[in-house]
Amino acid sequence: MSTHVSKAIQGMAFFLITLTTPASWAAPDAVAGQAKAQVCGACHGDKGVSNIPGVPHLAAQPQLSIFYQLLQFRDQRRKGGGMEAIATSLSEQDMRDIAAHYAAQAAPLPQAGGDAQKIARGQHIAQQQYCSSCHGAQLQGQKHVPRLSGQSTEYFVAQLRNLRSGARADMDGTMASAARSLTDEEIEAMAAYARSLP
Ligand code: HEC
Ligand code: HEC
């Protein structure tokens, strides 16, 4: 399983690099990214921690994951929250800079006082399903794989349902196959678990 998964990740990283590397682009600039992210703060929060239920936290997400999702929105392969239109106004350099800015922000605080039984159940399912083999031991994300820890539960549940149904396409089908057999109850338990993680 883990060899298979890490091969999938390496393969995808290679694919992304060959797909998106033009002859020249400057290194991502988090300071420039902060200025460019002004417009994003209204929904995603000043430092990438959103106050609006259903709007994802971007703080501490892997740089490559933010960049890749913005490309998906720009190319209309992913739709939702009006992000398709917003991403169209960004250059790839803007996306890289903004991604570097959010990746460097402090992670959202874990939610205290959640339903302990539900959280334990979510942890158990996540272990059984090897979610951490791609999303990291603390579900903190890595490379192009998004961070789940601390994420908004509404957002987590909606996205996992969309990935399960195919309403949200994923880049290589690995996430869709991971989601296929999950029930709503399992998804909600894992969302509570992820929300409780630092
Ligand atoms: C009007 C509110 C709004 C604004 C402004 C906005 N976003 Fe979003 N963003 C959303 C919503 C809602 C979603 C969830 C979309 C979905 O349901 O798939 C989202 C999703 C995203 C995601 C995907 C996160 C993930 O974990 O997959 C990224 C990346 C993102 N936005 C970046 C940005 C950036 C960068 C800007 C500014 C240039 C921005 N957003 C401006 C509402 C907004
Ligand atoms: C084989 C690797 C892999 C495994 C295993 C995996 N994921 Fe994912 N997951 C991904 C990738 C890659 C994405 C980004 C999908 C895309 O947009 O292309 C993703 C996206 C997600 C998202 C959307 C996050 C966001 O910010 O939009 C959620 C929620 C999620 N995964 C939950 C899970 C859960 C829960 C499990 C275990 C049942 C799991 N994943 C197992 C690779 C994986």
Image: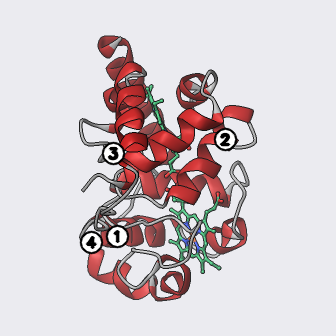
Residue 32 falls in which quadrant of the image? bottom left
Where in the figure is residue 178, as x and y percent of width and height?
Answer: 53, 24
How far apart are the alpha carbons under marks 3 and 4? 14 Å
Q: The N terminus lies in which quarter of the figure?
A: top left
How far apart are the alpha carbons under marks 2 and 3? 19 Å
Residue contact at pointers 1 and 3, CB within 8 angstroms: no
Q: Residue at x 69, y 68 (%)?
A: 81
Beta carbon at label 1 within 8 Å of ligand 1? yes
Of callouts 2 and 3, the N-terminal one: 3
Q: Quick check: 138 left or right of 74?
A: left
How far apart are the alpha carbons under marks 1 and 2? 25 Å
Where in the figure is residue 27, as x and y percent of width and height?
Answer: 28, 64
Q: Which residue is mark 4?
A: 105
Q: Which residue is mark 3?
A: 141
Instruction: Choose mark 1 or mark 2, whichever is in front.
Output: 2
Residue contact at pointers 1 and 2, CB within 8 angstroms: no
Q: Which residue is mark 1?
A: 102
Query: What's the residue type where badge 1 is placed?
Result: Tyr
Where in the figure is residue 152, as x and y percent of width and height?
Answer: 48, 61
50 vs 118, nearest the viewer:
118
Number of other residues with Cα within 10 Å of mark 1, as a class: few under 14, some 14 to 19, many 20 or more: many
How far apart are the alpha carbons under marks 2 and 4? 28 Å
**Circle 1 sits in a helix, a strand or a loop, which is it?**
helix
In the picture shown, does residue 121 fall above or below 118? Answer: above
Q: Which residue is mark 2?
A: 161
Instruction: Choose mark 2 or mark 3, whichever is in front.
Output: 2
Number of other residues with Cα within 10 Å of mark 4, as a class: few under 14, some 14 to 19, many 20 or more: some
Q: The C terminus lies in which quarter of the figure?
A: bottom left
Residue 83 shows up from this direction: yes
Residue contact at pointers 3 and 4, CB within 8 angstroms: no
How far apart are the alpha carbons under marks 1 and 3? 14 Å
